[in-house]
Amino acid sequence: MRPKTLCSFAEKLTLPEIVGRLWNPCTTRASVAPSVEPCAFSTAAAMPSITDAPVMNPPVTNYWYVTYASVFGDDPSAPVKALIARMKALGPKFSPATGGFLTGASAIDGIVAAIKRAGGSTNGATLAAKMQGFHNLPTISGLVSFSPKLHSVFGRTYRVVEVQDNNPKYVGKIKASSPASLG
């Protein structure tokens, strides 16, 4: 069978590498909150279909994507490369397959900074108030900001990965010049 590409309006790309279904209320509420992350309201899904054409396996080429980190040994950040090496040393099931792993580590950096700024308090409301004041906070994923208006990290620099003949490689960085105006 050969894959047939279909468009599904029941899926929404909420962040790089994260797909949520619209009928999942928790994911949907989080996904439609004001955000400066890239979004799309439909994605392609492959479904098997019978055709008279032979099954092909062409290489992926001329494909670019943005991600939090390059997991192919060429990320420009030494701390990111060191974290990837530590994870790989734990075994294959701990080796990151995408750059999405970095958001957890940077969230911990943010929580640690908030606790320090709160004088050691772990009270949720106190920490939230401290986080809303983050502006260019250094994390393992780079400088990030947070605001009471957006309730989402913004200002992060993303890695651009290019794929040629099934070979991914880091080719540069990209950062939004400012948060999107949501009206």
Image: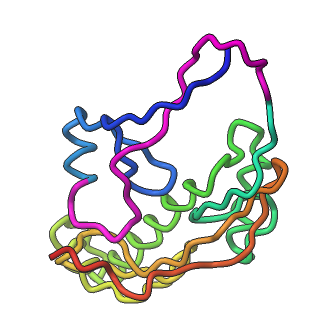
Is residue 89 shown above or below 156?
A: above
- Foreground of the two, 63 or 14: 63
| Residue 80 found in image quarter | bottom right
Residue 165 vs 129, above or below: the answer is above
Q: Residue at x 74, y 58 (%)?
A: 62
Query: Residue at left 80%, top 31%?
Result: 57
The residue lying at 28 percent from left, 43 percent from top is 27
In this rendering, the answer to whether 156 lies above or below 169 is below
Farthest front residue in view: 52
Residue 164: image x %, image y %? 81, 56
Q: Is residue 155 left or right of residue 73?
A: left
Q: Is residue 2 left or right of residue 47?
A: right
Query: Relative to the observer, which residue lies in front, 68 or 45?
Result: 45
In the rendered structure, which segment of residues is drawn in magenta?
32-56
133 relative to 71, above or below:
below
Left or right: 65 as drawn, with respect to 87: left
Q: How many marks?
A: 0
Q: Quadrant of the N terminus?
A: top right
The location of residue 98, given as percent across then percent down, is 63, 51
Magenta stretch: dominant secondary structure: loop
Residue 142's spot in the image, x, y percent? 55, 79
Observer-nearest residue: 23 or 98?
Answer: 23
Q: In which quadrant of the rendered view does residue 84 lie? A: bottom right
| Residue 54 is inside the magenta segment | yes
Is residue 46 located in the magenta-colored stretch of the structure?
yes
Figure colour scheme = rainbow
Task: Quarter of the image for the C terminus: give it.
Answer: bottom left
Q: Residue at x 69, y 64 (%)?
A: 161
Q: Position of residue 77 (x, y in %)?
A: 71, 77
